Amino acid sequence: QMGDIPERMRPARLHGDFVDATGLIWPQLDERVHVVDEYPLQAQWPLVIGIDPGYRHPFGAVFMAVKDDGGVVAFADYKQRGLLIREHAKSMIEIVKQHAPHAVNHQAVKWLFETGRMGPEHDHVDDVVEARWVMDRTANQFRRELMEYGIACKRSDSKVRAGIDRVGAMLELRAEGVPGLEIMGERCPNLIQEMRMYC
């Protein structure tokens, strides 16, 4: 049905006209609504860190906190290419230390970066940073390597399309008139750019 097709795409479907599809994955992203100034995270908000590993394309991560009302705030992002896994791990843990120090076992992190490996008293890597680290289910080698540096990634439980739909639902305004997803703009320039360009 033509009514189900986004308005910008209708000329392509009706007449075969060229249409620039940039940004159509999440057309509901409105920076006036979703991008917010930074504010302090509460210690009780669980952290979720999504990782997109890469060798040829940049290694990226988005750092989020789940608020008491179920909303999510993206409070930092990370994007870098050409580094070793150890360097990515250290940078990501530093981001958590800076913005959510309450979630970090500082003694375990100190040991980790002084010795370059997990110590025997910190074999349980969840003790390093209290967060749910998530990565694509196919990235097993990255997962094993990050584990050596205190990051225990869970396999993503959804396929790409389901993830896209989940983010789209979070962008919708809730009954209180606030979005389910807020993005701290100063700290998340890469996330905003990717969301604008994702098609």
Image (tube, rainbow, N blue to C red):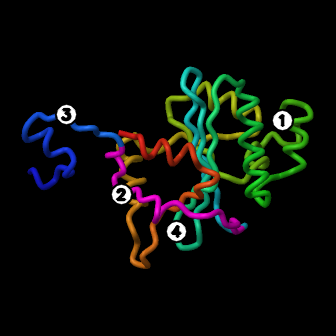
In the image, is residue 193 part of the stretch drawn in magenta?
no
Residue 28's label in the rendered image is 2
Q: CA distance from mark 3 to mark 4?
A: 40 Å
Q: CA distance from mark 3 to mark 2?
A: 22 Å
Cβ atoms at labels 4 and 2 below 8 Å apart: no
Circle 4 sits on which residue? 70
Question: Which residue occupies 22% across, 38% down?
Answer: 19
Residue 176, disc: none
Farthest residue toward the bottom?
176
Q: CA distance from mark 1 to mark 2?
A: 43 Å
Residues at discs 3 and 2 in contact (Cβ within 8 Å): no
Circle 4 Cα neighbour tier, 10 Å, few/some/many (<14 / 14–19 / ≥20): few
Q: Which residue matches tag 3?
A: 18
Q: Earlier in the sequence, mark 3 or mark 2?
A: 3
| Real-space CA distance between mark 4 and mark 2, rounded to the nearest whole angstrom | 19 Å
Mark-to-mark CA distance, 1 and 4: 33 Å
Residue 174, image x and y in percent? 40, 72
Amino acid under disc 3? Phe
Residue mark closest to the camera, 3 vs 2? 3
Q: Residue 44, located in which quarter of the rendered image?
A: bottom right
| Residue depicted at 66% across the width and 29% down the height | 144
Q: Quadrant of the C terminus?
A: top left
SS of the residue under disc 1: loop
Element type at mark 2 = loop
